[in-house]
Amino acid sequence: MKKRIVLVRHSDEPADDRVFAYLQQNGYEPVLRRAFAGEALDADDTVAGGVIYGGMYNVYDTSLHPFLLDEYRFIDFCMNAGIPLLGICQGAQQIAWLHGAHVGPPASGVHEFGCYPIYPAEGAEDFLPAPIHVTQSHWHGLELPEGAQHLASSALFPNQAFRIGEKVYGLQFHAEVTPTGFQRVQNRPTANYDKPGAQTREEQDRLLSLHDAAQAAWFDGFLRKLFPPLI
């Protein structure tokens, strides 16, 4: 039986991201789950890891969105079981918030929407050897949970990545999104081009054409460490 990795998604968009493709190509069984649509999140000994994707939900709005409580129970399950867990954007914020860290928009109102450089934190060169441009689409930031290792920062948001222990990672950015996937974000009526810090569509396209290949290569290496190939 293939090792099952539960992918907790927050939309009905196609699963054409780099995490899904990597898992399929390397011997895992990616299991898509949508708690927001009432789907149960697997939490048993057949689960070998989890990924919490980004989304549009405020991580602290558990009364408004009770399904978030199911996702928090899933995060607890993964961490207690000692299996790999990756939180991306909202997912990273959920891991941080569950462990007591503040999550929310900065007082400046600044957004990151486009392609921005991030920089390795001191002592985190094993995670990010050198600065790299990554895809971003968020306006909430996070503080580091107690006991977490700071891994990366950007000019606008100081906490771009963290690690808890050896198997739990939070990434504020979207290295998993392909250019096709990001085009869906760019084309949304709610796309935040007019917000402070956001890049124009033209600037986003220019920077992604220059930097996405390097982002994809870095992310593949990261996934190979977190979910080592089985084939």
Image (cartoon, rainbow, N blue to C red):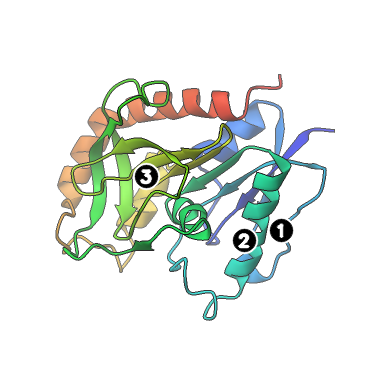
Q: Quadrant of residue 209?
A: top left
The reply to whether residue 34 is in sight is no
The residue beneath circle 3 is 173
Q: Which mark is residue 175?
A: none
Pick the front one: 35 or 127: 127
**Percent position of residue 8, x then y:** 60, 54
**Percent position of residue 151, x then y:** 37, 34
Amino acid on which disc 3 is placed? Phe
C-alpha gap between disc 2 and disc 1 = 8 Å
* Quadrant including the N terminus: top right
The residue beneath circle 2 is 71
Q: From the viewer's perspective, is residue 42 above or below residue 208?
A: below
Pick the front one: 20 or 209: 20
Q: Which residue is at 41% across, 23% downward?
A: 217
The residue beneath circle 1 is 41
Q: Which residue is at 54% across, 74% downward?
A: 62
Amino acid on which disc 1 is placed? Leu
Q: Secondary structure at mark 1?
A: loop
Amino acid on which disc 2 is placed? Glu
Q: From the viewer's perspective, is residue 185 above or below residue 58?
A: above
Is disc 2 in contact with disc 1, using a CB cutoff of under 8 Å?
yes
Q: Earlier in the sequence, mark 2 or mark 3?
A: 2
**Percent position of residue 210, x then y:** 23, 29
Q: Secondary structure at mark 2?
A: helix
Q: In screen coordinates, is 12 left or right of 107?
A: right
Q: State which mark lies toward you, 2 or 1.
A: 2
C-alpha gap between disc 2 and disc 3 = 20 Å
Q: Earlier in the sequence, mark 2 or mark 1?
A: 1
